[in-house]
Image (cartoon, grey):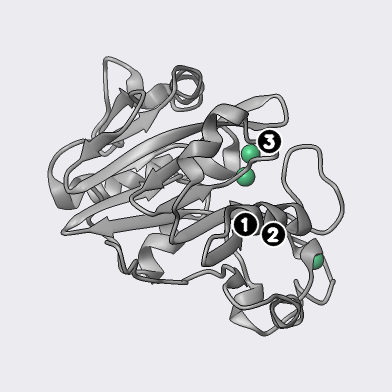
């Protein structure tokens, strides 16, 4: 946090230095990015990512959409527009926020994006099969995504009954866990861990972590095997992929 002198914000441990939440899924040459927040440029640079086949947007909050303009760098490399998958409500917000992208008279160098509606049920992007989950972030609908035996849910504080079957048989489960204190639109760490335990997932990662949660090493030491805090730059491979 800008201007914060708490022990997390002042920590030298790179695992305490978090950019906004984002996730990249790769399978057999297909790469899908989830969310394009204000730190996207830095995230693409430091992970040496320059080939993205599609972007999924979970919801219209700025910390998940403010980096969309950075995709123009990917356009330059690929030489074509990039598909952005989102809901109708997110599309409306993006058209407002990025009006210059959607004007008829386009100036050179603006991002080339194709807005695509996310279908119901499983669908395919390149070599990756996926399915959206419809969840709640306080009053705001938000999407999560399942890729094979992996599920990524950020900015969620309620999972409707209809979506629980999509959380069965997971190998890795990633869920937001903002802090210890209750929050009106995010799960707390204990709420997230309770869900992970209920689902009996072998590997759980907490994401969208606030500086208020505490130091990475201290929280990690309190977690049991297979329950971890995600950190910037974390990579893993699914056994089932
Ligand atoms: Zn702080
Ligand atoms: Zn949000
Ligand atoms: Zn967020």
Compared with 120, 163 (above or below) is below
- Label 3 or label 2, whichever comes before in sequence order: 3
Circle 3 or circle 1, nearest the eye? 1
Residue labelled 1 has its Cβ within 8 Å of some atom of ligand 3 = no
Residue labelled 3 has its Cβ within 8 Å of some atom of ligand 2 = no
The residue wearing badge 1 is 196
CA gap, disc 3 and disc 1: 14 Å
Image position, residue 77 (x, y; %): 17, 53
Quadrant of the frame with the C terminus: bottom left
Residue plotted at (34% across, 70% down): 237
Image position, residue 219 (x, y; %): 75, 75
The residue wearing badge 3 is 158
Image position, residue 89 (x, y; %): 50, 18
Residue plotted at (47% across, 72% down): 234
Is any part of residue 201 visible from this angle?
Answer: yes
Compared with 69, 181 (above or below) is below
How many other residues sit within 10 Å of disc 1, few (<14), some (14-19) or many (≥20)? many
CA gap, disc 1 and disc 2: 5 Å
Residue labelled 2 has its Cβ within 8 Å of some atom of ligand 3 = no
The residue wearing badge 2 is 193
Q: Name the quadrant containing residue 197.
A: bottom right
Q: Is residue 29 left or right of residue 214?
A: left
Q: Is residue 56 left or right of residue 164?
A: left
For this rendering, which residue is in front, 168 or 19? Answer: 168
Contact between marks 3 and 1 (CB within 8 A): the answer is no
Image position, residue 169 (x, y; %): 44, 52
Q: Is residue 44 left or right of residue 152?
A: left
């Amino acid at each position: 946090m800008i201007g914060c002198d708490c022990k997390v914000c002042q920590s030298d441990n790179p695992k305490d230095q978090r950019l906004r939440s984002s996730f990249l899924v790769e399978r057999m040459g297909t790469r899908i990015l989830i969310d394009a927040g204000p730190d996207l440029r830095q995230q693409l640079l430091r992970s040496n990512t320059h080939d993205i086949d599609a972007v999924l947007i979970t919801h219209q909050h700025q910390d998940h959409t403010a980096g969309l303009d950075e995709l123009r760098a990917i356009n330059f490399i690929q030489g074509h527009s990039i598909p952005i998958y989102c809901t109708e409500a997110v599309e409306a917000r993006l058209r407002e926020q990025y009006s210059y992208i959607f004007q008829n008279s386009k100036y050179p160098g603006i991002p080339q994006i194709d807005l695509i509606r996310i279908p119901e049920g499983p669908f395919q992007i390149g070599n990756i099969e996926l399915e959206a989950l419809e969840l709640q972030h306080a009053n705001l609908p938000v999407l999560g995504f399942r890729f094979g035996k992996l599920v990524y849910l950020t900015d969620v504080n309620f999972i409707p009954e209809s979506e629980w079957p999509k959380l069965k048989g997971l190998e890795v489960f990633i869920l937001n866990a903002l802090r210890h204190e209750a929050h009106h639109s995010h799960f707390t760490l204990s709420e997230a861990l309770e869900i992970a335990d209920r689902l009996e997932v072998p590997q759980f990662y907490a994401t969208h972590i606030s500086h208020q949660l505490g130091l990475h090493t201290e929280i990690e030491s309190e977690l049991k095997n297979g329950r971890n805090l995600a950190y910037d730059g974390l990579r893993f491979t699914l056994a089932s992929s």
